[in-house]
Image (spheres, rainbow, N blue to C red):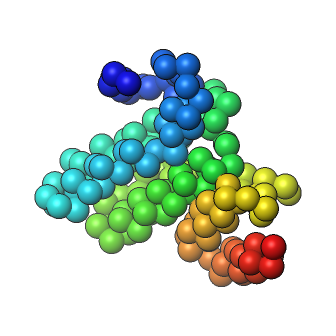
Amino acid sequence: MPPYRMSKPFDWRVDPYDDSKWCFQLQTLRYLMIYHSAYRETGNEEYFLSLIDWFGDWWSSAKSIPGFYTWHDMATGIRAEKIHQLAQEIKASGIKKPVWFDEMIQAHVRVLRKKGFIRLNHNHGLYAVHGLRCLAEHLGPCMKKTYLVMRTLALRR
């Protein structure tokens, strides 16, 4: 596959290769974590600020014009883990948290907690439960209790 140029604002619904797997991967945002690795290796805040900016661009799009894969169960779980990593780094670094950040976390938790969203009978559910567990750390003890109940149910199946 040839490279696909990304610039902000980005059309997060794009499908340049007519490839559902590519669209799915786009929504996970995990490929953006290279900025996080670069920040940790160099200490250069510009890498981390760029990462935050890309997440903000995604969030803006997700709120206004969500695509087919925006809230895909497995992509949402994977992305939730990345949001958790971002939140931890923001806290550890002292970088100011964007005003939209908590709203993004809460939206993910709402989606992940919708009845029937997490399917416990296949691998997509594992990613979604893991994502919910990650985000629970940022919303308090009540969410952690919800995660423990869901994990117990998943282990019984």
Outermost residue, right direction? Answer: 115
Q: Quick check: can you spot residue 64?
A: no
Q: Tell me where residue 125 sits by quadrant.
A: bottom right
Q: Tell me where residue 140 sits by quadrant.
A: bottom right
Nearer to the camera, 26 or 106: 26
Q: Tell me where residue 133 sits by quadrant.
A: bottom right
Question: On the rendered structure, is 105 left or right of 114?
Answer: left
Against 14, residue 78 (above or below) is: below
Quadrant of image for the C terminus: bottom right
Quadrant of image for the N terminus: top left
Q: Measured from the top left, where is residue 141 in percent x and y? A: 65, 81
Nearer to the camera, 99 or 154: 154
The residue shown at (51%, 40%) is: 25
Question: On the rendered structure, is 143 left or right of 9?
Answer: right
The residue shown at (46%, 44%) is: 29
Q: Measured from the top left, where is residue 22 in percent x and y? A: 51, 32
Against 154, residue 50 (above or below) is: above
Q: Quick check: can you spot residue 9?
A: yes
The residue shown at (26%, 57%) is: 37
